[in-house]
Image (cartoon, rainbow, N blue to C red):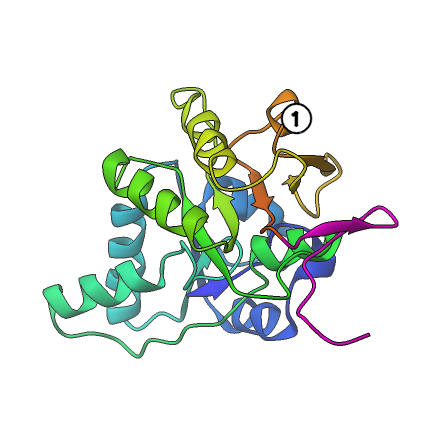
Amino acid sequence: MVGIGPGGVSDRTRRAEEAIAESTVVVGYSRYLELMADLTEGKEVIATGMTKEVERCRVALERARGGEVVALLSSGDPGIYGMAGLVLELAEREGDPPVLEVVPGVSSVSAAAARLGAPLMLDFACISLSDLLVPWDVIRARLEATAAADLVVALFNPRSRKRMRQVEKAGAIFLKHRPGSTPVGIATDLGAAEEKVVLSDLDHFLEFEIGMRSVVIIGNRSSRVIQGRFVTPRGYRL
């Protein structure tokens, strides 16, 4: 289970590149395989589309049980909204598990934070707004609790063609607890040629383009902008 980072070559880890190099079979979502094409020459490549995560993991496990060295790709880190947990669950259910290893990667939340400044210097939460696997009522309760606790929050999967309103509802929840001037950063297509990084605030961030490949970071009540950078002070005496 290999984390390939947010997508750009410069954000890959050496350990991830070595794991792919040692593999004979590489399995992944078609977009991830395109990003890793320079590392997969001469290897068997198995591509699947969106929403095919279970099938992807089953294929990887089957090939590994057959004696192949398999690299199953996840964007970011495989243990953060990635494939690691699903593989471990399936391996337990199906029995006869192969040797399994999780190779961490640069999560898009840490990559986004680095592009924006230092918004995650204090306690923070990560919440996915996708309700494909988690009911919206549960997501809303988590947003309410995070907003009330004054945690910085990173929103994953904020918007898609079928889910347009969740990020608007999230913004409204946070506006009940934080001023409209609270910094909000939007990082999209990190590491790619199309990368866009925007620094806004709670009152205005919805005016900017937000999609499935965006990460939205909302500051807490102490977060501020310092010379164009989004910073959450940790509390040091200066």
Of the 4 image quadrants, the one containing the C terminus is: bottom right
Classify 206 as above or below 74: above
Left or right of residue 5: residue 100: left
Looking at the rendered structure, the secondary structure element under dot 1 is loop
**Which of 211 and 113 lies nearest the eye of the viewer?**
113
Comparing 141 with 1, the one in front is 141
In the displayed structure, 181 sits above or below 6; it is: above
Residue 121, horizontal then vertical, whole percent: 64, 66
Residue 87, horizontal then vertical, whole percent: 28, 62
Identified at 20% across, 64% down, the residue is: 89
Examine the rendering and report whether any part of residue 118 can be seen: yes
Residue 23 located left or right of residue 55: right
Q: Specify whether 22 is left or right of 128.
A: right
Q: Residue furthest right?
A: 227
Considering only vertical position in the picture, is 152 above or below 141?
Answer: below
Q: Is residue 66 visible to us here? A: no
Residue 140 x, y percent position in the rendering: 32, 38
The kind of secondary structure the magenta stretch mainly shows is loop
Q: Amino acid at mark 1?
A: His
Q: Image quadrant of residue 211?
A: top right
Task: Classify mark 1: residues with Cα within 10 Å, few (<14), some (14-19) or many (20+).
Answer: some
| Residue 160: quarter of image | top left
Query: Dividing the image into 4 quarters, which one contains the N terminus?
Result: bottom left
Q: Position of residue 117 (x, y in %)?
A: 75, 55
- Residue highlighted by disc 1: 204
Residues in magenta? 222-238
Residue 4 to residue 197: above or below: below
Q: Does 89 lie within the magenta span? A: no
Residue drawn at (51%, 53%) of the image: 75
Q: Pick out the residue farthest to the bottom.
A: 99
